[in-house]
Amino acid sequence: MPSASAILAAPLALLLASIAPAAAVAQVGPVAAAPSEIPEGFTLAADGTTLVHTASGLHFPAEFEGFKRLNEKTFDPSGEYVAIGYDRPLGTGKDHIVVRMAIVHIDQMSARDHYMIMRQAAMAHFAAPSIASEGPAKIPTNRKLDAYRGTFSGYRDNQPWLFSLTTVNYGYWSGRMTAAFPQAQAAEAEKYLGLLLGEVRAQKPKAPKR
């Protein structure tokens, strides 16, 4: 497989998530997409497994650092609202970290407004959710980007979980990401999430040609 930097093209914006599937996947485990399944709005890269979002040029490898890409869903056949998920087992494999990403074309919406619209949906999938922190965020590779992030705690099946919601405004494209994992596995989850985010932040979406 080519180097991670070469194949992983997804800004943090992309990494921002479709929330409902995140909790569901965490319960039932990952369902990897078959390489032959090319969702609407995507093409297949030369390696035969990496998906390329045609409108933005962002790349999503089938696997990276133990993460497996989940079944993709295109919300808009035009390719202007798409979602991708990744799942990675933690510890003995019983627990998982789940990352859901979405990229969407939204006219004139700040990252904060995007975040506020999605916050309740993110919290709704956990019992007794509480906000640990929220506010403007900085993307290390582009500190001028308009980004907003919230971190939360809550419960699933009486087990404490940690989760987050991040939104980024890239101009033509906006995105959101959720990441969720059991609190008991926080150290390992943060380690692998950091690796995924490092590769994801290396890319920037492009506006489609008109």
Image (spheres, helix red, strand yellow):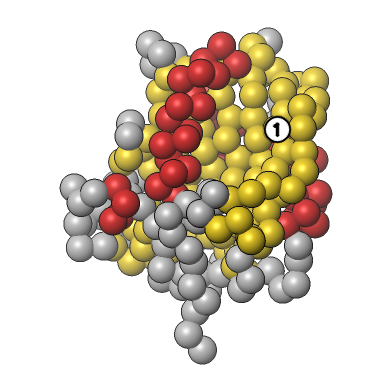
The residue at 72%/21% (across/down) is 154
Q: Quadrant of residue 64?
A: top left
Q: State left or right for residue 46 relative to residue 37.
A: left
- Between 9 and 43, the residue placed more toward the observer is 9
23 in relation to 3, above or below: above
Pinpoint residue 116: horizontal percent, then vertical percent.
81, 49
Pinpoint residue 92: horizontal percent, then vertical percent.
38, 11
Q: Quadrant of residue 42?
A: bottom left
The residue at 72%/23% (across/down) is 153
Number of numbered callouts drawn: 1
Within-10-Å neighbours for mark 1: few <14, some 14–19, many 20+: some
- Between 122 and 74, the residue placed more toward the observer is 122
Q: State left or right for residue 91 relative to residue 36.
A: right
Pinpoint residue 133: horizontal percent, then vertical percent.
77, 32
39 in relation to 161, above or below: below
Pinpoint residue 81: horizontal percent, then vertical percent.
58, 64
127 in relation to 67, above or below: above
Label 1 sits on a secondary structure element that is strand
Residue at image mark 1? 151
Q: Is residue 145 visible?
A: yes
Q: Amino acid at mark 1?
A: Thr
The residue at 28%/63% (across/down) is 44
Q: Is residue 14 visible?
A: no
- Between 145 and 123, the residue placed more toward the observer is 145
The residue at 41%/37% (across/down) is 195
Q: State left or right for residue 126 relative to residue 13.
A: right
